[in-house]
Structure formats: structure tokens, C-alpha cells
Image (cartoon, rainbow, N blue to C red):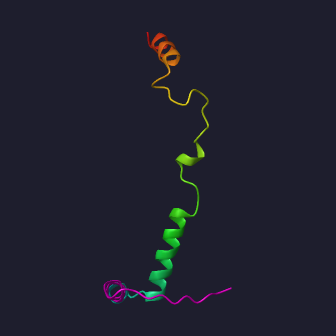
Amino acid sequence: MRSTLTIRLPDELADALRRISRQSGVPQGDIVRQAVKAHLGQTGGPTVMSRYFGAIGGPADLSTNTTYRRAWRKKRA
């Protein structure tokens, strides 16, 4: 199913869009569709790091946990 979207662009964006369209030979609508698709692809899903948040058990703040620091020093020695 197709939808029509009407947007208002500032003069600078409209001029840049016309210029890029003329230079590349790609219709303005295709350029806008590609830009929207790229933007939604970047923000549409979870970030790479968010998959790993909370995946490792341990104290919340390892830098202030003296027990953990002592155990870590022993492992390094």
C-alpha cells in the first residue's frame, strides 16, 4: 500500500535537493525515500551495545567494590 506525504522544506534544503537531483539524474522523490529509509534503518532497532546491557553479572560499580578489586589483583599476580 502506498501513502502520500506532503512536507515543507526550508529553501536551503529544497535547493540542495533540486541540485542533487539534477546532478545525479535521480528524481527528488527517490532521494527523499532513500534518506528516510536510511534514517529509519539507523534508528529503527536496538543498538549493538543494548543487546549486551545486563548480560554480565556482578556488582553495579566495580570501581568502588573493594572485594572485587582485591580478587582482581590476586588474579593478575
Q: Residue at x 54, y 66 (%)?
A: 41
Q: Residue at x 43, y 9 (%)?
A: 77
User: For this rendering, which residue is in front, 38 or 25?
Assistant: 38
Percent x, y for residue 2?
A: 64, 87
Q: Is residue 15 magenta?
A: yes
Q: Indicate the quadrant where residue 58 lies.
A: top right
Q: Indicate the quadrant where residue 46 lies.
A: bottom right
Magenta residues span 1-18
Instruction: Name the side, left or right, on which 53 lies relative to 22.
Output: right
Instruction: Name the side, left or right, on which 69 lies relative to 14.
Output: right
| Residue 10 to residue 70: above or below | below
Q: Indicate the quadrant where residue 11 lies.
A: bottom left
Q: Residue at x 61, y 30 (%)?
A: 57
Total marks in image? 0
| Residue 20 to residue 52: above or below | below
Percent x, y for residue 70?
A: 48, 13
Percent x, y for residue 68?
A: 52, 18
| Residue 9 to residue 73: above or below | below
Instruction: Name the quadrant of the N terminus.
Output: bottom right
Percent x, y for residue 72?
A: 48, 16
